[in-house]
Every structure is written in structure tokens, then in C-alpha cells.
Amino acid sequence: MNSCIKNYWNSEYIKESWIYGLEPTILAKNIVESCKCKIPLKILDIGCGYGRDTIYYAQNGFVASGIDISNTAIKQARILAERNKTKVNYLVGDFLKSRFKKKLLI
């Protein structure tokens, strides 16, 4: 993992929990809306941060996974998922070195 990037994001998430709010992004809302007729689908949220979009996907019928380089963000994501009683698979790691990338390239 690139330790400079990891350290940067850990420090950002430590400064302020839920730094970008708790509402899903417009992108997440658009993805859910455009895929409603195809549910259930698997989705991987790369750079998921504290999981606001990943949780939104799961709440809308997706089998959702999230990966982020920041262990602080993933801790927050797991707390947020638990608070929302939502099942999401989270992984701390560098996507470019992850098992997800290997599966996508096969």
C-alpha cells in the first residue's frame, strides 16, 4: 500500500467522522435508479470511504462490498452499517493489489 496515501486518508477520517455527510452521492442514487429492474446485482465500491454509498446500495437490494485504503474509514463504515442494520462486506486494502482486481481481470 502507498503509505503516504493511507496516512493522508486516515488523518482526514480521524479529524472528522462522516466528513462528507451521511447521504449517498448523486452517482450512487443514479446507479440504484438505473439498475432497479436488474436487482440483485453485486457491486464493489472502490474507495468506499466510510461506506455511505455502499450502505445505500445494500439497502436497495445490491450485494454490496467496499474497499478502502484507510483502516480508519473502514472502521467508520462498519459502525455505520451496523447502525443502519445493513450487511456490507468491507475490506481494508489497496484495490490495485486486491483479490477484487484479480477477479475483475479474469
Image: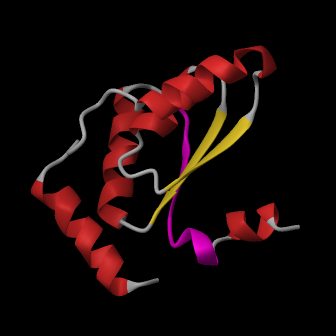
Q: Can see residue 9?
A: yes
Residue at image x 77%, y 14%? 37
Q: Nearer the viewer, residue 29 or 81?
A: 29
User: In the image as oriented, which residue stretches furthest toward the right?
Assistant: 106
Residue at (33, 56) in percent of width and height: 73
Q: Percent from the top left, x then y, of residue 97? A: 62, 78
Task: Answer with left or right where residue 7 lies relative to residue 62.
Answer: left
The x, y position of residue 102, in whole percent, is: 77, 71
Above-or-below relation of 106 to 37: below
What residue is at 46 percent from the left and 83 percent from the top? 1
Total count of labels: 0
**In magenta stretch: residue 14:** no
Q: Does 94 lie within the magenta span? A: yes
* Magenta-drawn segment: 87-97
Please say if 71 is above or below 41. Answer: below
Q: Is residue 47 left or right of residue 19?
A: right
Q: Can residue 58 be seen from the camera position used here?
A: no
Residue at the extreme left of the image, as rendered: 15
Q: Is residue 81 left or right of residue 44?
A: left
> Horizontal and vertical percent for residue 101?
70, 67
